[in-house]
Image (cartoon, rainbow, N blue to C red):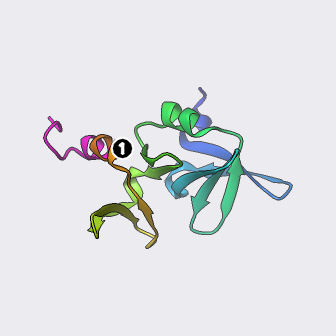
Amino acid sequence: MNQLSQTTIIGYLDQDIHVVKIEDIYAILSEGAKVYLETDEQEYETKLKLYEVEEQYGDTFVRINKSTLINLHKLQSIQNKIGKDQALLNNGISFPISRKYLKELKKKLGIGREAK
């Protein structure tokens, strides 16, 4: 993996190709067969699959449910709303956290019983 690919992901908007900085991405979502990079300004499509992003950028992104990865550096809080956990990001958008992935999220944040 070259230096540029460690800090960026290629995103597509209409017919244009964009080099999207990792630090600008809040979340990566899959909808059907398509995967989208969510930034403040735009939603870019990427050719990567969610599992490929997890493998390549696992220090930055963590899966919180079947179809969503979030940027750990953009996480503001984990909130419990009516028994359901939500990841609130710095941009004010929240995503549901499934119980299956909550333990790994807490581990990456260094909290919880197995954080040591």
- Segment colored magenta: 105-116
User: Is residue 25 positioned above or below 53 on the image?
Assistant: below
Q: Residue at x 44, y 62 (%)?
A: 95
Residue 57 is left or right of residue 34, and the answer is: left
Q: Please, which residue is most extreme toward the top here?
A: 1
Q: Is residue 30 magenta?
A: no
Residue 26 is left or right of residue 106, and the answer is: right
Residue under label 1: 101
Dot 1 crowding, Cα within 10 Å, few <14, some 14–19, many 20+? some
Rendering coords of residue 26 (x, y %): 50, 58
Identify the amino acid type marked 1.
Tyr
Rendering coords of residue 5 (x, y %): 61, 36
Q: Quarter-wise, where is residue 81 in the image?
A: bottom left
Q: Residue at x 21, y 44 (%)?
A: 110
Q: Residue at x 61, y 37 (%)?
A: 4
Rendering coords of residue 43 (x, y %): 66, 61
Rendering coords of residue 28 (x, y %): 55, 51
